[in-house]
Image (spheres, helix red, strand yellow):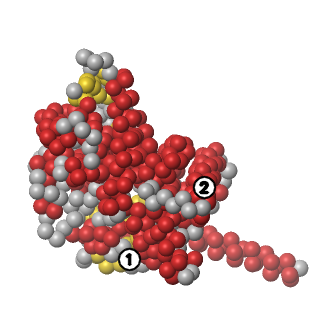
Amino acid sequence: MEVSGVVLWVIVLVLVWYVLRFLNWVWFRPKKMEKRLRAQGLKGSSYKLLFGDLKEVVNMLKDAKSKPINLSDNIVPRVVPFDYKSLNTYGKICFTWLGPRPLVHISEPTMIKEILAKNYEFQKMRGGNPLARLLGTGLADAETDRWAKHRKLINPAFHVEKLKHMVPAIYMSCAELVNKWEEMLPKESSCEIDVWPYLQRLSADVVSRTAFGSSFEEGRKIFELQRELAELVIQALQSIYIPGSSFLPTKKNKRMKEIDTQVQASIRSIINKRTIAMKEGHNSNDDLLGILLESNNKEIKLQGNISFGLSINEVIEECKLFYFAGQETTGNLLVWTLILLAQHTNWQARARDEVSQIFGDKKPDIDGLNRLKIVNMILNEVLRLYPPVVALGRMAHQDTKLGDITIPAGSFIQLQTLLLHHDRDIWGDDAHEFKPERFSEGVSKVMTKGQTSYLPFGGGPRICIGQNFALVEAKMALTMILQHFEFELSPSYSHGPHTIVTLQPQFGAHLNMRRV
């Protein structure tokens, strides 16, 4: 009887301990963090039990996506309606709630610069739904020393000299796109084409060719799977995550894990074939995988220890990242560029004239692409108005000083790229207008001294490693499109910027196109 009594007390104590932990997670800790933030003068929404502001975020997004907007580049209220409302209500530095964690919004350039510079202190978000990591745990997800190791080994793949060798593969994919559109177009009249799916396939083909060389057909399948996975991950992130729920055998959880298994198996097969070929003396360093494997092997030999290199699983994760980041960034940049040039036909004509002067009807080369000034101005302005990633997430893993405030440990931080790019205080009253002339003297001239106001590829030490690759691909594709086609918006075009990880046209990109 005494033993059973002791066991009962132990069970009661364990239950009480778990209940107190749960209450601390969903109420006491969030309220304590809210009090600390308000005591420092920050304004924000009041914490709501467990869900925080998630329900309002989802409802506002659902309402925003229910209909297109007028043809305007003032897209912030549609793309991030809750964030837009919060910053207008509480100020450029404020907080809302992502479940039981505070989300500190930062759209002040000097503070953003400090956060991006201190990448060891302000790390990527952790503690959310672990299924989000199925998209890739490579360089973009790595932190501190692991990040430094991955960056060092991957850097050679994106060196300018290596990119020159990839230009023929980029050209081949662009030529296939041009041929498809020419086949669809009557010789002396226009035809409506939704260019968005074609540009997605173009960027997927480019990444497939430049990442895996002769295995690019296999790469296409990987892209399709990664895209489905991204949509499922976004749905998961828009609901409160209960620890352990990712292990439940729900239909969506099972599908996400199935996709990840298929993607890993496909990439592993490609890597195994390449490794065998390298051992037989067929070294290929003209694609990203070959350069990465070569860089990895050199580092292992130099250090004399395999731990200094990447494991096969780490190489797989980097390949997944090549796919996702490479395809998303360039495809989005191209589609918004065509949409904007279809509206601003004067800039389309200026860009075509420049392309004609440099290349005529000849095949574009890397030297000519580097001389394109008007095209470069246009791409920079598109990236300002429609950045691929609308916000950058960070986290304070310990109490961290930022300017005059201290961010409590465990707080999420959101750097508001889209709001920053559309801020009238920074860009002027015409901040929402398409004006490529802003960049006539380059990016550095438009940046306020000592600040970070333009972040299409992030910033600081973690600035996107593939930005030069993305811009070379975009210049090649745009050059070849301008050489062969004129285009304007179709009457059936509906303006609906929205995010599925990156900023995309919800209703497609319907253009009326004709041959030049």
The picture places residue 438, in percent across and down from the top left corner, at: 12, 51
Q: Is residue 1 left or right of residue 483?
A: right
Circles 1 and 2: CB atoms closer than 8 Å: no
Residue at point 21%, 61% (across, down) = 453
Task: Determine the image quadrant of residue 287.
Answer: bottom left
Tell me which numbered mark, 1 or 2, is placed earlier along the sequence: 1
Nearer to me, 217 or 284 = 284
Crowd around label 2: few <14 · some 14–19 · many ≥20 (10 Å): few
The residue singled out by tag 1 in the image is: 121
The residue singled out by tag 2 in the image is: 273
Nearer to me, 265 or 270 = 270
Please name the amino acid that badge 1 sits on.
Glu
Nearer to me, 193 or 388 = 193
Please name the amino acid that badge 2 sits on.
Lys
Crowd around label 1: few <14 · some 14–19 · many ≥20 (10 Å): some
Q: In the rendering, which numbered label is found on residue 516?
A: none
Q: Is residue 347 left or right of residue 213?
A: left
Q: Is residue 361 visible?
A: yes
The picture places residue 229, in percent across and down from the top left corner, at: 53, 47
Residue at point 25%, 17% (across, down) = 189
Element at badge 2? helix
Residue at point 59%, 64% (across, down) = 279
Position above or below: 347 against 373: above
Nearer to me, 218 or 128 = 218
Position above or below: 499 against 72: below
The picture places residue 88, in percent across and down from the top left corner, at: 24, 54
Q: Is residue 376 left or right of residue 4?
A: left
The picture places residue 356, in percent across and down from the top left corner, at: 17, 38
Element at badge 1? loop
Q: Is residue 146 visible?
A: no
Q: Is residue 244 left or right of residue 172?
A: right
